[in-house]
């Protein structure tokens, strides 16, 4: 999964949005990390990645019935550097979705 997160634009965008959605409402509105709860972005990344996630969400469009996102080469490069540190959270979300499917 890690290799794919480093190269696949769609998965990078989805991972960014999943992490952003794990932030508290206050953290999203202030673009900061106030709570050390292991959810969402760390203090160093909060402002930049929250802003990027909002931009990526606004770029969403449908292609063949699937949601897609416009993401630039620069954004991909940044996400390839930032996302690996959040692999634990992404795996947690993945396991929760598998368990929910039964």
Image (cartoon, helix red, strand yellow):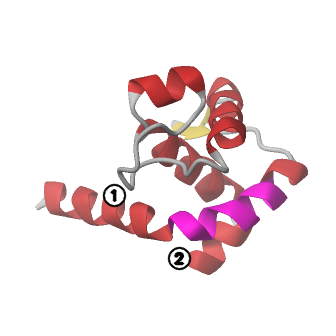
Residue 79 falls inside the magenta stretch? yes
Question: What is the CA distance from the residue labelled 1 to the residue labelled 2?
Answer: 13 Å
Does the segment drawn in magenta span residue 39? no
Residue in the image at 83% along x and 60% along y:
77
Name the secondary structure under disc 1.
helix
Residue annotated with mark 1: 93
For the record, the magenta segment spans 76-86
Residue in the foreground of this view, choosing between 78 and 94: 78
Determine the image quadrant of residue 11: bottom right
Task: Please identify the residue farthest to the left as the structure is shown.
Answer: 102
Q: Residues within 10 Å of mark 2 (few under 14, many from 20)?
A: few
Q: Position of residue 54 (x, y in %)?
A: 64, 28
Secondary structure at numbered mark 2: loop
Q: Is residue 40 left or right of residue 83?
A: left
Label located before the other in sequence (1 or 2): 2
Q: Residue 96, position in %: x, y?
A: 23, 59
Judge whether 79 appears above or below 29 on screen: below
Is residue 65 placed above or below 96 in the rendered structure? Answer: above
């Amino acid at each position: 999964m890690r290799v794919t997160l480093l190269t696949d634009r769609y998965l990078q965008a989805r991972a960014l949005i999943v992490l952003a959605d794990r932030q508290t409402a206050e953290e999203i509105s202030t673009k900061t990390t106030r709570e050390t709860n292991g959810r969402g972005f760390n203090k160093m990344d909060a402002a930049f990645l929250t802003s990027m996630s909002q931009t990526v969400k606004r770029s969403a469009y449908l292609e063949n019935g699937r949601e897609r996102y416009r993401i630039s080469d620069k954004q991909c490069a940044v996400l390839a550097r930032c996302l690996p540190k959040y692999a634990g959270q992404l795996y947690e979300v993945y396991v929760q979705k598998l368990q929910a499917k039964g």
